Image (cartoon, rainbow, N blue to C red):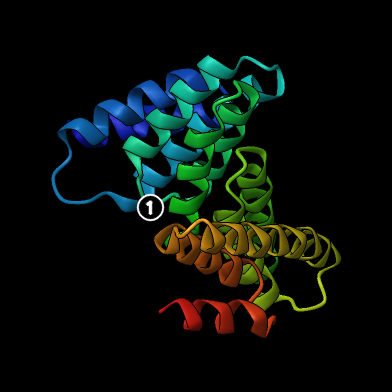
Amino acid sequence: RAEFFEARGKAYYYLRDYKTAVSNFKQALKIQSGEPIELARLTSNLVDADGLSRLKAKEFADAIHLFSQALTIDPSNSYIYVHRALAFIGQGKVQEAIKGLELFLSKNDASKKTAVSIHILVARLNRQLKLSTAAAVHVQAALKLDPSNEEALKLYSLLRGRATELYNEATDLILRNEPKRAIECLTHAITLDDTDPRFLVRRGVIH
């Protein structure tokens, strides 16, 4: 019975009636025993393609729904996390987008070039949320993969400026006898720029 739905789905697939093909493939996956990996990936890709067309049309809610369906069908189809994140960005849901992109990065499925691009995107999104430390983590990851990447180097330069601001804030906090908060500032500064010895020395003095 599962074979019947799969065969019928493939017939519709070759006729380029992808919607009907997906419907039959889903039915086959529902009743098929074992783990039909190839069929699951094909079905997931078809649903993802539909989601991408909705994304292109800026129908973000429909796109997110379809991308989520595609991931349910095949959770290992990791690039769909990126597609769904782009739809979240379109909706202005930056935190949800970051979660999806970080999940994609955690799968370690990306090429070096793709991983660098995603790290930079996540860094920019974190800067948008004024989360400089989180941004620095991804900039450093991008530079570790591609030390000469111009976009990552530009972001690193911007974040180093924020590190100096944190250093000055820590100095003010020390003068106000708030050592705990000063240490937090310096720790963030070190994350943003671990090449400036002032941050380590000042934090060591407080400890």
Q: Residue at x 55, y 37 (%)?
A: 85
For the C terminus, the quadrant is bottom left
Residue nearest the viewer, comparing 190 with 29? 190
Residue nearest the viewer, comparing 196 with 24? 196
The image shows residue 187 at horizontal and vertical percentages of 50, 68
On screen, 3 above or below 65? Answer: below
Q: Secondary structure at mark 1?
A: loop
Residue 68 position by quadrant: top left
Badge 1 amino acid: Ser
Instruction: For residue 56, say whether it is visible.
Output: yes
Q: Residue at x 49, y 82 (%)?
A: 205
Count of marks placed on residues: 1
On screen, 156 above or below 54? Answer: below
Q: Which residue is mark 1?
A: 76
Residue 87 position by quadrant: top right
Q: Residue at x 33, y 37 (%)?
A: 73
Instruction: For residue 108, say whether it is visible.
Output: no
The image shows residue 51 at horizontal and vertical percentages of 56, 26
Residue nearest the viewer, comparing 111 with 132? 132
How would you rate the neighbour count of disc 1 (Cα within 10 Å): few for under 14, some for 14-19, many for 20 or more? Answer: some
- On screen, residue 195 versus residue 176, left or right, reads right
For the N terminus, the quadrant is top left
Residue 52 position by quadrant: top right
- On screen, residue 206 versus residue 24, left or right, reads right
The image shows residue 54 at horizontal and vertical percentages of 62, 20
- On screen, residue 181 versus residue 150, left or right, reads left
Q: Residue at x 62, y 56 (%)?
A: 169
The image shows residue 66 at horizontal and vertical percentages of 46, 24
